[in-house]
Amino acid sequence: MIVNCGTTPVLGFGCSPLLGRAGRSSSLRAIERAYDAGIRFFDTARSYGYGEGEALLGEFLKGKRDSTIIATKFGIVAAKQQVWKRIAKPLVRGALMAVPGMRKAVQQQVSAQFQKGQFTVGVLQRSIEESLSKLKTDYVDILFMHEAPASVMTDDELMRELERLVHDGKVRAAGISSSPDVMAAAVEQRQPAITALQFPCNVFDLSVARRNFFAATRDILLVANNPFGGIMRVQQTREALRGIAGSPDTPVSIREKLGDVDDRVLAEVVLNVITRGTGIHVVLPSMMRPEHLRANIEAMSRPRFSPDDIFWLQDYLAADGQTASLKVSDARV
């Protein structure tokens, strides 16, 4: 494996909220808390923070580069923001806090400011130079193709350019960040340039973590993102776990440990179900709040659930590829 994260699953810091949902001061505080707590894997992208997220991370990591792993992405281009939009961002954040119902409309406006599917060699060359400049480093540990379609695997020119960047030392490993279906295609159409895969994985969709096709690809770095699935999924996960805790089919020891499904229990179940025995090397939750950071670190380092407990929960939530929502419906009958 080109990027060595060890044999124990690693907790990484997902940088997507930086300078987006969070302002500059709170973004810097979140990175600092994570670093001070021992987090050393940081996942960012050219598009994060409207194109400025990498610069903020690079600013913080000055003098700390040798002790960190930096993953970034290309393929989504953020449009340059007009001055008035930059000024308005704090006002929008405040409005979202006051009126959560505005979230969908704001998300639609935000999406319109990005150009997706930019996977030409020219974009790759410009993007990596911009990333290196913003991050204040001469190499990145991993460069992912951001939300790439499976068709990139057959783009020989693009694959050769990724290999060249690895050969030249600007990139230590290249990979794809996309959906589970694209991950399957990436493994099936394996290209020498691709040695890392990043994909969404949560308790409602454990399909990637449970698929056997990863067993034959020991040299691929597996990174799971969005493990809690967003605000709505967090609530659904709590409800799912409460349903499991109330099921007579659940072992008594697991029911007792689930308790009232507080933040610590939620983090412990989610992160360990995703990483325990699945082959996943890194999991990337968003940890902007100190209480979430603490819960995630304790969940990974001092779990109360035994390996057998976690394996039972994995089987219950995703046996034979079924979704957790179906399993919870069974539990409530």
Image (cartoon, rainbow, N blue to C red):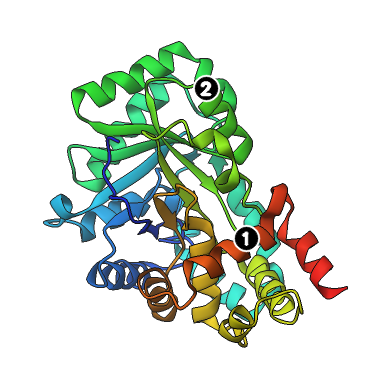
The label number, if any, that marks residue 152 in the structure image? 2
- Considering the image in quadrants, where does the C terminus appear? bottom right
Residue at x 52% of width, y 22% of height: 152
Q: Nearer the viewer, residue 123 or 157?
A: 157
The crowd level at tag 2 (other Cα within 10 Å; few <14, some 14-19, many 20+) is some
Three-letter amino acid code at the position of disc 2: Val
Image x and y of residue 325, in percent = 76, 62
Number of disc labels: 2
Q: Is residue 204 visible?
A: no
Dot 1 falls on a residue whose secondary structure is loop
Dot 2 falls on a residue whose secondary structure is helix
Q: CA distance from mark 1 to mark 2?
A: 28 Å
Q: Quadrant of residue 56?
A: bottom left
Image x and y of residue 241, in percent = 67, 74
| Left or right of 301, for residue 309 | right
| Left or right of 324, for residue 41 | left
| Left or right of 87, for residue 139 | left
- The residue mark sitting in front, 1 or 2, is 1
The label number, if any, that marks residue 98 in the structure image? none
Q: Is residue 43 visible?
A: yes
**Residue receiving disc 1:** 203
Q: Nearer the viewer, residue 211 or 100?
A: 211
